[in-house]
Amino acid sequence: MISIKNKEFLFTPITDYIISAEKVAHVQVGNNAEHALLVLTKTGYSSIPVLDAQDKLKGLLSMRTVTDSILGLAHIEYERLPDLKVDEIMRTELHTIKSTDTLQKGLDLLIDHPFVCVIKEDGTFSGILTRRVMLKKFKKYIYNIE
Ligand code: 2BA
């Protein structure tokens, strides 16, 4: 059985594990739902951040959110996509983290979320911390124990 005696690594800041903003697919608040659907489909990501013109994080948009927003009683109303704005349909309850926060905080959040957005004090989006990067970090750590 593996026992992690040295828990110091849990207090390491997440700084080196962030996927930086310029590498993260995102949409802008003013974009319409049709554009958002295109970005989600083309990138293959199931959920992406929504930013405003000042690069502040405003919400999250997923394939499900878009589909939900055009779900009519009898069929999916694709014709409504160009008229719906991203900020009308995005999720705004966000779990965020700062680059100075620890791997422990990242780990706690990534149990329930596939990724967490990293923001600065003023809300500017700096990037994301993903489950994949965190799991790789833990794998490396566990393989090197003893
Ligand atoms: P999902 O899109 O549901 O992706 C789940 C996992 O599938 C990803 O885990 C990754 O391992 C793989 N995957 C999906 N699409 C991929 C692609 N286009 N290229 C490479 N691998 C892909 P994680 O890497 O841990 O990412 C967790 C979540 O973070 C993703 O969930 C997505 O919502 C978001 N994400 C990751 N990288 C992103 C990026 N560059 N831009 C925007 N969102 C990103």
Image (spheres, grey):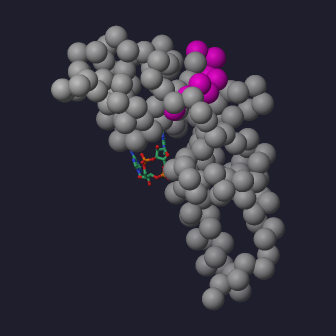
| Magenta stretch holds residue 8 | no
Q: Quadrant of residue 19?
A: top right
Furthest-top residue in this view? 83
Q: Is residue 79 left or right of residue 107?
A: left
Foreground residue among 62 and 38: 62
87 to the left or right of 110: left
Task: Give, as a single range, the part of the protein colored magenta.
Answer: 53-60
In percent of width and height, residue 50 lies at 52, 27
Image position of 33 with respect to 138: above or below: above
Residue name at image x 45 percent, y 23 percent: 89
Q: Position of residue 37 (x, y in %)?
A: 34, 28
How many discs appear? 0
In the picture, which quadrant includes the N terminus? bottom right
Q: Quadrant of the C terminus?
A: bottom right
**Residue at the (63%, 17%) spot, across then down:** 54
Q: Which residue is at a point 52% across and 57% down the rendered structure image?
A: 132
Instruction: Judge from the rendering whether residue 28 lies leftward or rightward of residue 139; answer left or right.
Output: left
Q: As drawn, which residue projects farthest toward the front?
A: 73
Q: Give the vertical position of 98 relative to 102 (above or below).
A: above
How far from the left and from the top, in percent, is residue 57? 61, 27
